[in-house]
Image: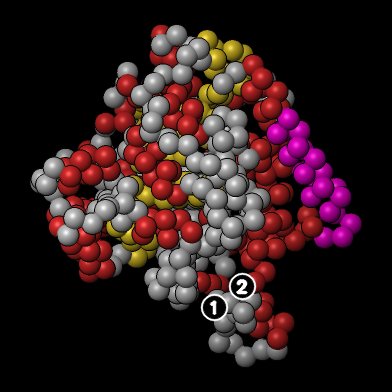
Amino acid sequence: MTAVELLHLQQKGELTAQTIAEAFLSAVQQREPTLRSFLWMDSEDVLRQAAAVDAKRRAGQPLGALAGVPVAIKDVLCTKGVRTTCASKILANFIPPYDAHVIERLKAADAILFGKTNMDEFAMGSSTENSAFQQTRNPWDSTRIPGGSSGGSAAAVAGCQTPLALGTDTGGSIRQPAALCGIVGLKPTYGRVSRYGLIAYASSLDQIGPFAHDVTDCALLLQVIAGHDARDSTSAPLPVPDYRAELENPVRPLRIGIPREFFDKGLDPEVESLVRQALREYEKLGATLIDVSLPHSPYALAAYYIVAPAEASSNLARYDGMHYGHRTSQKSDLIGTYAKSRGEGFGKEVQRRIMIGTYVLSSGYKDAYYRKALKVRRLIKQDYDHAFQECDVLMGPTSPTAAFRIGEKVNDPLAMYLSDVYTVGCNLAGLPGLSIPCGFTREGLPVGLQLIGPPFSEEKLLRIARMYEKVTDWHTRRPPLISAKPNPA
Ligand code: GLN
């Protein structure tokens, strides 16, 4: 069931938060041996939270917008008193003394905090294979990756272990796993959601956003987490629109820009044909398709893989075994202790990024690499600005392929990085991006359609996505593993 259905049935008195929590806990228990979406789940705490919501309802007290609805949390978000690891050995025993802003918001909305989900270590990756702890599997085919880095959150929603989840997107980590798992994922405009309590990967790119089965649930969760927070200096002091007020109203006229560069070589033909079918659906709804160009997009990945590691190398400097995190038990001097602690605590990909980042920021190379990448970033932003003078939204594939096999790309970082070719531009330009399911390959793997809008256009993006959802049923499909459906009623 969707969050909206769960809220409705509680209002009608047909379900309690308790029965909902029990049903999802049993779904977790049943499917976790296959999916391995969660790094942490405290079922007693979940049931306590649910009982508190039911008590509030019985006492006639006002209830929040997500009362009794489970929301799984990517393990990069700080949860007070609950282990938060970033799927890294270096933080294996970190228990935050405070909640991230979004967690405070969820608590205030009476949501049920439903476990911490697996991810690529420090959100670096596109397959969740970089987790130091376990391999999450795609609910549509357990021999395949769920996407990454928020693969645990995406698999948990697609596998109906939770109706909602939070992820983070630095270069595509919400949209790409959403696409590969056949669900809806939204990366908000940079500044829309406070990053307070989000363990930083690349601070100028990171954003927190929702995973859901459909656009309405996505709007519901965004509503709860969006808005200004003085503790994040990049949080935008702008009012938050009511995302559901106009959701059912189609955007007319609708001009859809189709970036030529998004349909270039490298795009899987089956993915292309499903995306083009979706575009034809929009044409039938009266939209005009406009050919546009984002001329600098061929440089987006290169710029991203300089800017993101540069920021990561700086952000991850704090984990030195002294101030934070794992400390080696090998005897050594100060520098040796730093090096050994970091060598033991960080996985291979994280070490690779720290080395790239340190290199591109070092004196003598910073102008050639880091500063150049910042200039390219500006040009990429300008491409989008120009495109949005002609159209309301850009559409294309979220990912160049459907879910690949576990192990297929682990030894080829460049092939792995190419998974982000259509998503990183959005982060470099700070724009909102949404992925919605738009069909299945012949092998039964989900494919995502990506919608990109101007800054703070989430309301419109969701409306545009909803237009498509109303004339298709992809969002109602559930993977075969759900057939033994635990029914909360
Ligand atoms: N796959 C990209 C990376 O490895 C994006 C990750 C993300 O968005 N967190 O950096």
Q: Which residues are magenta?
A: 362-382
Residue under circle 1?
A: 326
Q: Quadrant of the N terminus?
A: top left
Q: Main secondary structure of the magenta part?
A: helix
Where residue 380 appears, as percent x and y from the top left, is 71, 33
Residue 285 in view here = yes
Residue 356 in view here = no
| Separation of marks 1 and 2 at Cα, in angstroms | 8 Å
The answer to which quarter of the image holds residue 377 is top right
Q: Work out which residue is located at the far right of the displayed protein and give it.
A: 364
Residue under circle 2?
A: 319
Tag 1 and tag 2, C-beta contact below 8 Å: yes
Residue plotted at (69% across, 83% down): 336
Counting residues from the start of the chain, the first of labels 1 and 2 encountered is: 2
Where residue 146 appears, as percent x and y from the top left, is 40, 45
As drawn, is 8 to the left or to the right of 254?
A: left
Q: How is the image coloured?
A: secondary structure
Residue plotted at (37% across, 41% down): 220
Label 2 environment density (alpha carbons within 10 Å; few <14, some 14–19, many ≥20): some
Where residue 400 appears, as percent x and y from the top left, is 52, 31
Give the amino acid type for the residue marked by disc 2 in the picture. Answer: Tyr
Give the amino acid type for the residue marked by disc 1 in the picture. Answer: His
Please say whether residue 363 is one of the residues in the magenta stretch. Answer: yes
43 over 33 or under it: above or below: below
Please say whether residue 439 is one of the residues in the magenta stretch. Answer: no
Q: How many numbered badges does the structure rendering display?
A: 2
For label 2, being within 8 Å of ligand 1 is answered no
As drawn, is 408 to the left or to the right of 257?
A: left
10 over 386 or under it: above or below: below
The answer to which quarter of the image holds residue 6 is top left
